[in-house]
Amino acid sequence: MSAYRFAYRHLAQLLPIIGLMLAASPPSLADWTMAVANSAYYTDDVALFSVTRRLSLTDDPTQPTVDRPRQGSDFVYEPSAEWGWSGQNPLGTMAASINAGGYVFMDKSAFTHGLFEAEWSQTLPSQTQLSLHYNVVPELYLGQNTFKTRTGSSADYAERLTSHYGSVHLDQALTDTLTVRLLGRYGQRLYHAPFQHRNTEFWTVGPHLEWEINPNIEILVGYHYERGTADHQQAPHFPDNISYINHYGSAELKIQWLEGFTSLLIVDYEKNSFTSNNAEDEHYGATEQLYQGEIELLYELTAATTVKLGWQHGRRKLTTEPQAIKNTNVWLGVEYVY
């Protein structure tokens, strides 16, 4: 089964569930929205682009291990479309959405891939909100990588995988301006041959805190603890076990300077410790630390149209490598909601 059929199958399984949930609300109270967006990026490292862009409390900060960065620069387009629905039921407000998008690389087209997500949420009278998320990235290309056999021979192959996870968010309003969120998620990264020994299952837990200091300033801080385990039946037989323990922290500051003009500042820190017990493994005893910063400016041209301008820079250092790896992305985008 191809990864695209895999993604379609799992999203299709969610549609009947969402449909039953939507049926519980009176149609007269329903609110439908549609948002389309397109952004143009320049990246100086195509192998790290997706890893860097998805480093977020609300996305997938622990992307697959990239063993060969520095695979060239490129221009990238990100088209996306999101359908959303919200309505009232006896418990409160219920909402559902489906998002489809992707990254289209102009020159390094092998790195082009899609992104798909479905979400459902329900608010409760106790000012609690329960949210369910499902995210899948099929046919993600990481570049060429070396496959080492048990006999010691090696050869280069294209490294691809399908990554997907489900998560649960429980938001509780403590005051009118302070909300705490508890997050839990479980996922899998399924590699194509010959790298299927890297198949990884992972789980994540962590708290988020949202604070609206005043109507113009908001802060979001959070921490994730994650453990990823490679296929127990195959990984121990190869000197290539990417099992890990991950600590991730992030802080986001959103400031509305003028009517329609907002800035977003994000700082991320990640520590990834590989847990292989094989002394011949290239990841044995290795630890990777990442520091990343992002600035995005948003300007509302109209009530429905927003222009975005952004800059992002990350620095990664693996203890087994002599030099740090850096990645910079800049972008210009437009979002339209109707």
Image (cartoon, grey):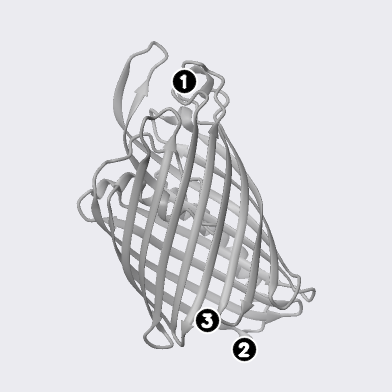
State which quarter of the image contains the N terminus: top left
Left or right: where 86 falls relative to 55: right
Residue at figure coordinates x 75%, y 75% from the top left: 175
Label 1, label 3: how far apart the Cα atoms are = 52 Å
The spot of residue 257 in percent (x, y) is 47, 81
Inspect the image, locate mark 1, and give the three-letter code of the amino acid beneath it: Asp
The residue beneath circle 2 is 28
Mark found first going from the N terminus, 1 or 3: 3
The residue to which callout 1 is attached is: 281
SS state under label 1 = loop
Label 3: which secondary element: strand
Residue at the right extreme of this rendering:
126
Give, as a three-letter code, the residue at label 3.
Answer: Trp
For mark 3, what is the residue?
32
Q: Quadrant of residue 247?
A: top right
* Residue positioned most to the left: 107
The residue located at (33%, 35%) in the rendering is 68
Residue 14 seen in this snapshot: yes
Q: Are the residues tagged 1 and 3 within 8 Å (C-beta)? A: no
